[in-house]
Image (spheres, rainbow, N blue to C red):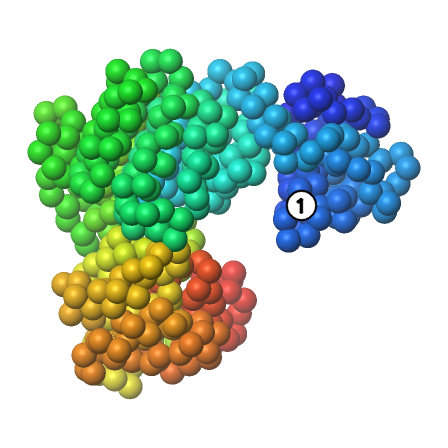
Amino acid sequence: MRLWTSKEAETATGGHSTFEWQATGVSIDTRTIRPGDLFVALKNVRDGHEFAAEAMRKGASAAMVSRIPGNVKRNAPLLVVDDVLAALQDLGKAARDRSAARVVAVTGSVGKTSTKEMLRVVLEGHGSTHVAEASYNNHWGVPLTLARMPADVRFAVVELGMNHPGEIEPLALMARPHVAIVTAIAPAHLEAFDNIDGIAHEKASMFRGLENGGSAVVNGDPPASEILARAAREATDRVVTFGTSPGNHHRLDHVDVMENVTIGHARAWRTPILYKVAAPGRHFAMNALGVIAAVRELGCDRAMAIADLVRWQPPSGRGTREILGLDKFDEEMTITLIDDAFNANPASMAAALEILAKSRPTDDLGRISQGRRIAILGDMLELGPDEISMHSGLAGLADMHALDEVHCAGPRMKSLWRVLPKSQRGEFTESAEEMAGLAPRLIDAGDVVLVKGSKGSRISIVAEALRNMASSVHGMSGEDAY
């Protein structure tokens, strides 16, 4: 289906095309480009202009460039603009202007992506839905998401992220949401902010982008809930809160966290509701409650949304559970891997450790008769001057005491490793690469293993090392193994 014509893109960006073209998609990466895509030659680590010729060879309908690359054919269809990033943002704004979709924007220190994906599941049951890929939530990710949005979709979900002050509001003004959700405020990106109140003010700036008559859906629990509520009330008369505190419009009363499911018991505008997600985690129950509140603000069927929520599962690297075989001759010789290696701060680390603490290992399987709860933890990044105390403070979490072994990788995690009881203290390595080399000998059949850390800590390679070990045992590719 046609997404952009050369004339439409020229009007949106102020650029000019060397030849007429039509695009069915928009791409910034030749590794994932599809035939018919408009290739956008952004500058990042590498200059996208260097890849324009490759994009054409892979079937791109045109390339958006600020200069004509020397390696493209003379008859290549190009959209020439003054600045590629600015033009992508203009293309996103134009896509938003022409769309009649009901738009939901999601931000927060934790839970953005899970909430976004829950919204995908429940809104698809109500009509065609366009949702941001991966964590495309920054100055190029948001306009790319909008530029990819078909004009005739009924719903769109956009994720807004930030690392520094002043980043959220421009994204919100671009997305112009009908419903804006703040999932939670927690210590994250404190390198760029004086305190958690600064984070709350930045997240709350999203409400300035609300469409007239739009709704603000706000986590009403401390910390910083009043900052969010005040900013929301300044932007709209429609402010809806959710959380565990009395007075929230949607109040989570009780959560049952089990091996593979979480059940939330809540009240929505005084109406008792029971809902379920197919993944363990108290934080998932809270995110789901925010989704239920947003669905109501969109005018959708709440009962249908609650029924559909059970189909949601966390995206890869955000708490997914996998069973990995350790013996090709004995199917019972397995471990459970909880891969939560995409993001980490004290709040999300506490949530992940609670899931591990509630997991049930299997006894009498491996060389060690008792199955264990094992955490392999990488550094939490961008926490500011108190980062060392935030790492060592994890030792005081109640759920930490339920773990059998804790292995730590990275200079920041060393502060946790040092204060752990000797009975729990596992291996310490300076890097995730070193820990990945040790990983196969740290586990045994029956264990439940959590791998958790910030993406930049590269702790995900430990999870991959465990998968590769299982794949080699089974004698098949990772894709076939699961």
User: Which residue sits at x=18%, y=41%?
Assistant: 222
**Foreground pick, 414 / 12:** 414
Q: Position of residue 124 (x, y in %)?
A: 41, 29
Residue 446's place in the image compared with 155, above or below, is below
- Residue name at image x 53 percent, y 38 percent: 139
Find the residue positioned furthest to the top: 212
Count of picture labels: 1
Position above or below: 118 against 217: below
Q: Nearer the viewer, residue 108 or 6?
A: 108
Look at the image and tell me whether residue 265 can be seen.
no
Q: In the rendered structure, which amino acid carries the disc numbered 1?
A: Lys
Taking the spot 44% from the left edge, 64% from the top edge, the residue there is 457
- Expressed as whole percent of the image width and height from the top left, the position of residue 388 reads 30, 66
* Horizontal side of residue 301 vs 100, given as left or right: left
As helix, strand or loop, the secondary structure at mark 1 comes to loop
- Quadrant where the N terminus is found in the figure: top right
